[in-house]
Amino acid sequence: MTDIIAISGSLRKGSFNTALLNAAERMFPDHIQAASINGIPLYNADFEESQGIPAVVVDLKDRIAGADGLLIATPEYNNSMPGVLKNAVDWLSRPADDIPRVFHGKPVAVIGASPGGFGTILAQSAWLPVLRTLKTRPWYGGRLMVSRVSNLVDDDGVLTDKDTREKVEKFVRGFIEFCDD
C-alpha cells in the first residue's frame, strides 16, 4: 500500500493549504498521512553543531524516508515559497550526507491554495530548483493550484466546494499511481 507523507507549508490554524491536505487525507485515509512542521526552529548551523538535529526534525525525516511519496501544500508569500516550509526543508537536508536517505528518488508532488486569483503558481515553480537539488522525483502529471480558496473552505477549515474536492481527488489519485511505479 502506498504511504504518502503530506506537509502543509503554513502554520496558521485556519490554513487553506492544510485544508487541502486534510481533504486529501479524508479521501485517501489508507494512503495520506499528515505531518507537521510546527516546532521546527529556525535553521542555525551553530545550533546544529552544538545541539544536533532537533527531535522534531529527526522524526519528520524518518517519516519521509520511510514513505513512498511526499505531498507538499505550499502557500505563496510575496510571489514565492513560504519561509517556514523552506526552513523545514533546510533542516530536513541536514546533515548533508543524510539527503540521499530522505530525498533521493522520492516521488514529490506540490499543490497549493491561495486567496488570490493565480493560485500558487509562482510558489510551486520556486520549489522546482530545491526539489531538483535534493534529487527528488517530482510528479509532473498534473497541477493543482486553487485560486480564491477563501470562498471554498468553511469556518472549520473544511474544503466545501465540490469541484475543488474532485480536483484534489483526481490529483492525489494520480500521484498515488505515480508513487506505485
Image: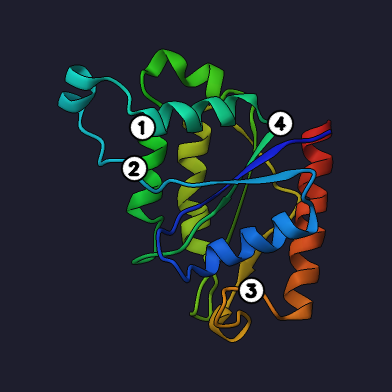
Q: Compared to 168, does 180 lie above or below?
A: above
Mark 2 sits on what residue?
87
Q: Give the residue type at disc 3.
A: Val
Residue under the point 69% across and 63% down:
23
Marks 1 and 2 sit apart, C-alpha to C-alpha, by 6 Å
> Closer to the camera: disc 3 or disc 2?
3
Q: Compared to 28, does 108 lie above or below?
A: above
> Closer to the camera: disc 3 or disc 4?
3
Badge number at residue 158: 3
Q: Residue pushed farthest bottom? A: 151
Give SS at disc 2. Answer: helix
Mark 4 sits on what residue?
68
Badge number at residue 46: none
Q: Residue pushed farthest top? A: 97
Q: Position of residue 135 (x, y in %)?
A: 55, 27
Would you say the residues marked 3 and 2 are in contact, meaning their CB atoms lie under 8 Å apart?
no
Residue 136, by quadrant, is top right
Would you say the residues marked 1 and 2 are in contact, meaning their CB atoms lie under 8 Å apart?
yes
Q: Give the residue type at disc 4.
A: Asp
Give SS at disc 4. Answer: loop
Quadrant in which the C terminus appears: top right
Would you say the residues marked 4 and 2 are in contact, meaning their CB atoms lie under 8 Å apart?
no
Would you say the residues marked 3 and 4 are in contact, meaning their CB atoms lie under 8 Å apart?
no
* Lower position in the chain sequence, tag 3 or tag 4: 4
Would you say the residues marked 4 and 1 are in contact, meaning their CB atoms lie under 8 Å apart?
no
Badge number at residue 91: 1
Would you say the residues marked 1 and 3 are in contact, meaning their CB atoms lie under 8 Å apart?
no
Residue under the point 74% across and 63% down:
168
Marks 3 and 4 sit apart, C-alpha to C-alpha, by 26 Å
Marks 1 and 3 sit apart, C-alpha to C-alpha, by 30 Å
